[in-house]
Image (cartoon, rainbow, N blue to C red):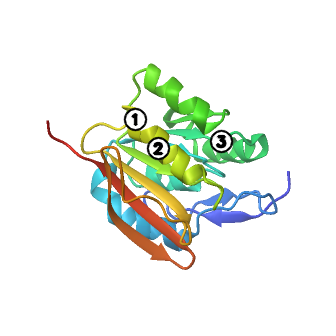
């Protein structure tokens, strides 16, 4: 398998080289954006279970594990990208902390919900401008995968207009970086 390397930008494993599988169609989240993401959510990471949807090379999940998350479930149906994730998890020795699912996100979400799984943080990064960001957001809005106080983050193209509200989901903030936007969603609580 040919490819390049990238580094973890933050946390206990900061500076560790990872295999990136460069040249494949998957787009890794840039280090600067991963650093900004961590700085905005660091208090929520300690001991958290995270769900990384459309995981690509898994750099976001690995970054969050480096910064205190306890466990990560990564969903990526591209088998080549999944082999890159597996290689990096082994390189870091984090096999006990990572669960890899090689199925479509639309299949994984109802299975996880049916199993009663919950995640304090869900990261969604589908291919840009395919409509998958909004359809995944819609699916998540009706499943009980994120407990009260949990956070849903969607990385999408700036040109992609996601709804500010969807069911009990409300966008609480957004952060732009070049042509990319991180939209932060939280669940309304109350009666």
The answer to whether the residues at label 2 and label 1 have Cβ atoms under 8 Å apart is yes
Q: Nearer the viewer, residue 119 or 35?
A: 119
The residue most toward the bottom is 178
Q: Nearer the viewer, residue 35 or 120?
A: 120
Q: Quadrant of residue 79?
A: top right
The residue that mark 3 highlights is 76
The residue that mark 2 highlights is 138
The residue that mark 1 highlights is 142
Of tags 2 and 3, which is closer to the observer?
Answer: 2
Query: How far separated are the C-alphas under marks 2 and 3?
Result: 19 Å
- Whether residue 116 appears in this view of the structure is yes
Where is residue 183 shown, x and y percent of the image? 42, 62
Q: Image check: 6 left or right of 118? A: right
Q: Residue visible at 57% across and 31% down?
A: 108
Q: Residue visible at 60% across and 39% down?
A: 75
Residue 105 in the image: above or below residue 159 = above
């Amino acid at each position: 398998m040919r490819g390049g390397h990238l580094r973890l930008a933050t946390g206990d494993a900061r500076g560790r080289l990872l295999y990136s599988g460069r040249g494949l169609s998957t787009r890794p989240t840039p280090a600067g954006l991963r650093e900004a993401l961590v700085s905005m959510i660091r208090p929520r990471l300690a001991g958290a279970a995270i769900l990384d949807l459309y995981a690509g090379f898994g750099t976001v999940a690995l970054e969050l594990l480096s910064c205190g998350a306890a466990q990560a479930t990564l969903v990526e149906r591209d088998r080549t990208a999944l082999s890159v994730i597996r290689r990096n998890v082994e390189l870091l020795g984090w096999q006990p902390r990572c669960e890899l699912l090689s199925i479509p996100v639309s299949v994984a979400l109802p299975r996880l919900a049916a199993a009663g799984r919950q995640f304090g943080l869900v990261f969604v990064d589908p291919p840009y401008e395919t409509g998958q960001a909004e359809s995944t957001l819609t699916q998540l809005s009706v499943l009980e995968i994120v407990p009260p106080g949990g956070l849903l983050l969607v990385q999408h193209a700036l040109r992609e207009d996601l709804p500010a509200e969807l069911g009990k989901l409300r966008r609480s903030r957004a952060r732009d970086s070049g042509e990319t936007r991180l939209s932060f969603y939280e669940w309304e609580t109350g009666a």
